[in-house]
Structure formats: structure tokens, C-alpha cells
Amino acid sequence: MASSGEEWSPDTLAFMDLAIQQAKLALDSLEVPVGCVILEDGKVIAAGRNRTTETRNATRHAEMEAIDVLLDQWQKNGLSQSEIAEKFSKCCLYVTCEPCIMCAAALSILGIKEVYYGCANEKFGGCGSILSLHLSDSKMLNSGDVLGRKGFKCTGGVMASEAVSLFRSFYEQGNPNAPKPHRPLVHQAMN
């Protein structure tokens, strides 16, 4: 999981920088600034950014966007389910924020090899902050893991301060797409 003060390889920093660039595109589109890239054999084969507001679909997280690019591409190339599973088992994901529970579960089911993330996701993190879905021995249900999760290696803290800075920028500018409160705010008079 997260390692503070760790020295990152130039490749790790370069790939995370590409994910940061995707997060900046999300920020420019008034989306929560999360971005990712997926690599196979050290080459970027897909990228994604949050598009939940744009698509009006809460599942359109950066990871899901990148996964769908690959699934579409590989299915168009005529790959079977087992061939697709084999390809995912060789892929690494770089994402600016710890995958949420939904994304961590999907990555585990797909059998991704490894995930590197920037900052922790203290509210919804699926790689240790809330649940540890990256661990193959973790159980989602008391009756056992019925979803066929495989687990994956996970390393956090890569360029975390850059990722946090993007979140700060997003929340400081305000979210024009946030729902309006249903109740008026109550102001108490100071006596």
C-alpha cells in the first residue's frame, strides 16, 4: 500500500504524470479530477478520466472508462474472454487516486496485474482505505468470494501531492454540477 518517502523510478513518475494529465482534462471539464492510464508491456494502451457529470452516469470513473476502451478494442479484434483475461493479467494501471470500491472490485475481477495510485481515497477507497479488495484473500461476503476476484499488487503514494492539489483546485472552484440543497441553510443568530 502507500509508502511515504519512497523513491519512485523515472518510468513510474512518467506514467503517473500521464494519469495526472488525464485528471487535468477532467478538471477542465468540471469533473472530479481523477485520471488513469493502463499499460501492457510498458506501453500505454488506454487512458481514462472521470466523466460522471458529462455522461450523467455515476459509474463513469476514470478506470471504467479505460477498461471499456480496452474491452471494446479487444472484442473488435476478435479476442475471446480467456484471451482478454490473459491480456488484463499482464496490465498495470496508474491512477491519480486510490480506486474506489466499485473500481477496485472490477479491477480484481478482471485480474489486472498491478495498480499504482496517487492519493488515498479515505471515503470510498477499495485498496486499503475502506476495503482491501486488491487482496486475493479478502472476502466481500461472509459466505465467500462469489465474484471470482483474483487480487492485484497495489502501491500508493505516487505523486500524491500533485493529485491532492488537483482535488483542492476542484473543490475551491466549487462544483457547479453539485445538487442544490433541498433545505435552506439555518443561520443561528449570535447573541
Image (cartoon, rainbow, N blue to C red):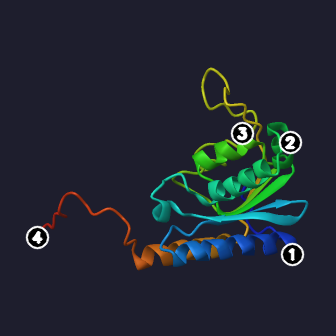
Classify residue 134 by image quadrant: top right
Residue shown at 66% from the left, 23% from the top: 144
Residue shown at 76% from the left, 48% from the top: 75
Q: Report the residue marked by disc 3.
A: 109
Crowding near pointer 4: few (<14 within 10 Å), some, many (20+)?
few
Crowding near pointer 1: few (<14 within 10 Å), some, many (20+)?
few
Q: Is residue 39 left or right of residue 178?
A: right
Task: Name above or below for residue 132 compared with residue 35.
Answer: above
The answer to whether any part of residue 128 appears in the image is: no
Q: Residue 62 location in percent, x, y? A: 62, 60
SS for callout 2: helix
Residue shown at 67% from the left, 41% from the top: 133
Q: Are marks 2 and 3 in contact (CB under 8 Å)?
A: no
Q: Report the residue marked by disc 4.
A: 189
C-alpha span from label 4 to label 1: 56 Å
Q: Report the residue marked by disc 2.
A: 83
Q: Upstream in the sequence, badge 1 or badge 2?
A: 1
C-alpha span from label 2 to label 4: 66 Å
SS for callout 3: helix
Q: Nearer the viewer, mark 1 or mark 2?
A: 2
Q: Upstream in the sequence, badge 2 or badge 3?
A: 2
Q: Upstream in the sequence, badge 3 or badge 4?
A: 3
Q: Nearer the viewer, residue 64 or 10?
A: 64
Q: Is residue 127 left or right of residue 11?
A: left
